[in-house]
């Protein structure tokens, strides 16, 4: 009956109504009529639905953890959460291609970009749409490492190049002598870019060999305003922000506040808060450091790229956490506890809440996303095809 009513409405009114539905409902609606079967997966409707989702700002959370299957195997599990109480919205998923014989504490979320998220480890990169549950394993970067050398991946980024209308993955790595002849001063920086439109990796030329070293942390990589950002270690062990413009494919840096840019001692995180680049400085969880002697600081860059616009917006009392993971809705900070549980800290109410979500210590990650019907590009018939969880 609902369909009969909608048939009597003008087409633009029908589209306006459909745009308000979640992705899961729209996937079912394709079966109602031939018109909707053609309309809903069209690029125009998908773009309109994405803009509508951005306006509504209804964000979901993906929570990742490593779980031990047996003495020789660990798996990566994703939970999909929504609401202040982080209620599950669907069953958990075990991610293929990310199984390991050890704790998966090098897995990282990269994104989100138009509702798509990249999940990476030291070997594989999986592009994933959490709303449609579709994913694709990207082709591995061709190894061009001479005998007697090895490659170490430092950082990975994922985002959209609006100029080329293409999704890209960028990988930063180092090639150095393999032990026992390893020379720490004989290293070569490499940067490779994967273009979705061509389904190929290519190496960038004339890379600055003095480029800052990527700083690894559970939340130290974000995609923001057409660029990928990483925390990095610059000259004299000063913390800086390194970013890669997806359009120009040029690296640049942003200085962090002078009062909190020391590499030795505290730990750091990088997030997007209030639509601004935001830096977290928190106590080292190592037992030899006393967390009671240090507070967490949250700094926001109010004007993009302007050093003088750094402003400290929160000073947080000592929290016994392993690391922060995400700031959601601009006030709820998700963290991993020392025991490997997910907890939240309300920045406004100074309130801690623990959730019944655990994983192997140091393996927890979280990222927020808006629902999108964006299709995962797959241009080559020879590459891994899009699959469904």
Image: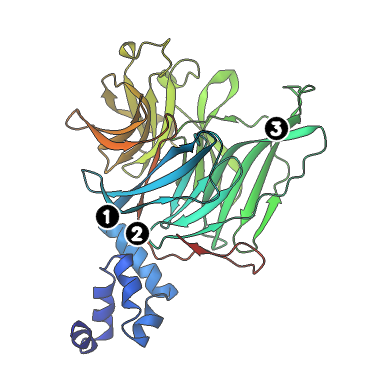
* Residue furthest to the right: 147
Spatial separation of the CA atoms under disc 1 and disc 2: 8 Å
Q: Which residue is mark 1?
A: 58
Considering depth in this image, is 378 or 298 the residue closer to the camera? 378
Q: Nearer the viewer, residue 234 or 172?
A: 172
Disc with the residue nearer the chain's start (2 vs 3):
3
Q: Is residue 365 above or below residue 159?
A: above
Q: Which residue is mark 2?
A: 371
Residue shown at the point (39%, 38%) measured from the top left: 271
Is residue 188 visible from the viewing direction of this image?
A: no
Q: Position of residue 353 (x, y in %)?
A: 22, 32
Is residue 311 positioned above or below 224 on the image? above
Instruction: Answer left or right for 188 relative to 37.
Output: right
Q: Residue lying farthest front?
A: 70
Q: Give the secondary structure at mark 2.
A: loop
Q: Is residue 199 left or right of residue 359?
A: right
Q: Is residue 25 left or right of residue 377?
A: left
Q: Are marks 1 and 2 in contact (CB under 8 Å)?
A: yes
- In the rendered view of the protein, which quadrant contains the C terminus? bottom left
Mark 2 and mark 3: Cα distance apart in space: 39 Å
């Amino acid at each position: 009956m609902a369909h009969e009513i909608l048939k009597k409405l003008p087409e633009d009114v029908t589209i306006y109504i459909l745009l308000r539905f979640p992705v899961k409902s729209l996937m079912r609606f394709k079966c109602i009529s031939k018109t909707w079967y053609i309309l809903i997966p069209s690029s125009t409707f998908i773009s309109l639905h994405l803009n509508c989702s951005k306006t509504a700002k209804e964000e979901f959370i993906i929570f990742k953890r490593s779980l031990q299957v047996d003495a020789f195997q660990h798996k990566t599990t994703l939970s999909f959460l929504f609401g202040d109480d982080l209620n599950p919205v669907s069953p958990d998923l075990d991610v293929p291609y990310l199984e390991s014989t050890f704790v998966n504490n090098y897995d990282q979320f990269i994104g989100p970009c138009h509702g798509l998220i990249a999940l990476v480890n030291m070997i594989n990169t999986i592009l994933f749409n959490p709303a449609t549950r579709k994913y694709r394993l990207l082709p591995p970067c061709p190894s061009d490492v001479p005998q007697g050398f090895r490659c170490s991946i430092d950082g990975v980024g994922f985002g959209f190049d609006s100029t080329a209308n293409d999704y890209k993955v960028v990988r930063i790595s180092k090639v150095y002598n393999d032990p026992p002849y390893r020379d720490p001063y004989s290293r070569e920086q490499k940067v490779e870019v994967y273009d979705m439109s061509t389904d190929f990796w290519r190496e960038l030329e004339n890379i600055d060999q003095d480029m800052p070293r990527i700083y690894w942390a559970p939340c130290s990589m974000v995609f923001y305003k057409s660029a990928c950002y990483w925390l990095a270690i610059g000259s004299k062990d000063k913390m800086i922000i390194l970013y890669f413009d997806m359009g120009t494919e040029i690296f640049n840096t942003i200085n962090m506040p002078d009062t909190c840019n020391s590499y030795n001692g505290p730990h750091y995180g990088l997030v997007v808060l209030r639509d601004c680049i935001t830096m977290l400085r928190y106590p080292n969880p190592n037992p030899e450091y006393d967390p009671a002697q240090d507070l967490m600081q949250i700094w926001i860059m109010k004007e993009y790229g302007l050093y003088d616009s750094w402003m400290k917006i929160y000073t947080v009392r000592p929290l016994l956490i392993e690391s922060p993971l995400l700031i959601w809705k601009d006030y709820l900070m998700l963290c991993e506890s020392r025991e490997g549980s997910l907890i939240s800290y309300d920045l406004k109410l100074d309130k801690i809440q623990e959730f019944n979500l655990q994983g192997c210590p140091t393996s927890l990650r979280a990222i927020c996303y808006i629902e999108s019907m964006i299709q995962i590009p797959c241009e080559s018939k020879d590459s891994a095809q899009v699959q469904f969880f």
